[in-house]
Amino acid sequence: MKVIGLTGTIGSGKEIVREIFEKNANSYSVVLSSLLKEDALKKQGIKITREIRQNLGNELRKQYGTNVLVKIAVSFMQKNKDFLIIEGIRSPGEADFLREKFGDDFKLISVDASQQTRFERISHRGREGDPKTWEEFVKLDERDQGKDEPEYGQQVRKCIEMADIALQNDGSLEELQKKVEDVIKQF
């Protein structure tokens, strides 16, 4: 089984890349942010924002190590699949753990787009908790990429630099689909 880690900036298209993999390859996926205990906060009436998710992830990595979320994700592996897709690698410790565990069967794929393109996408998708203004977006984007973050914090820029394959996603959905299909053929 091949293990694919997806990393990338906010609004770059990681979710779409995962969906293309699911559609075109015998794969199973885990979205790391879905492993956070958001349901407990919702029951307390706390609105879940991207900042809340960042804080939850940081707290887990601080308490249990920078690879805690991927350790959980790996436990979901299904032996009858060709690929395990792990969306949302945000810490070099996560990528390092997967490289050590799976060796050449692990590939880290980064997805990126210009900041303006990503803001436009986020503005149009209307997902709960997404930033509404350019200023909110820039602040969140900088934090996600690692600016002023501790070692256990969000470190997406470092993860992008570690990637085996880089997908630039400033074009159309069709262009991205072709790029991902070409990546799948490499395996």
Image (cartoon, rainbow, N blue to C red):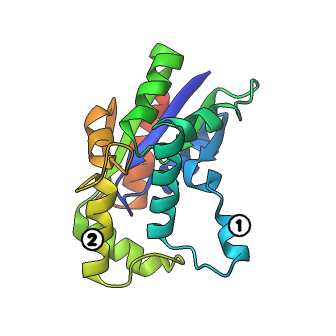
- Residue 79 image point, x, y percent: 74, 23
- Residue 152 image point, x, y percent: 39, 44
Point 39% across, 37% down: residue: 109
- Circle 1 crowding by C-alpha within 10 Å: few under 14, some 14–19, many from 20: few
Q: Nearer the viewer, mark 2 or mark 1?
A: 1
Relative to 128, does residue 37 appear above or below in the rendering?
above
Closer to the chain start, of discs 2 and 1, is 1
At label 2, the amino acid type is Lys
Which residue is identified by label 2? 139
Which residue is identified by label 1? 40
Pick the front one: 165 or 178: 165
Point 46% across, 45% down: residue: 62
Residue 71: in sight, yes or no?
A: yes
- Residue 61 image point, x, y percent: 48, 44
- Residue 136 image point, x, y percent: 31, 78
At label 1, the amino acid type is Ala
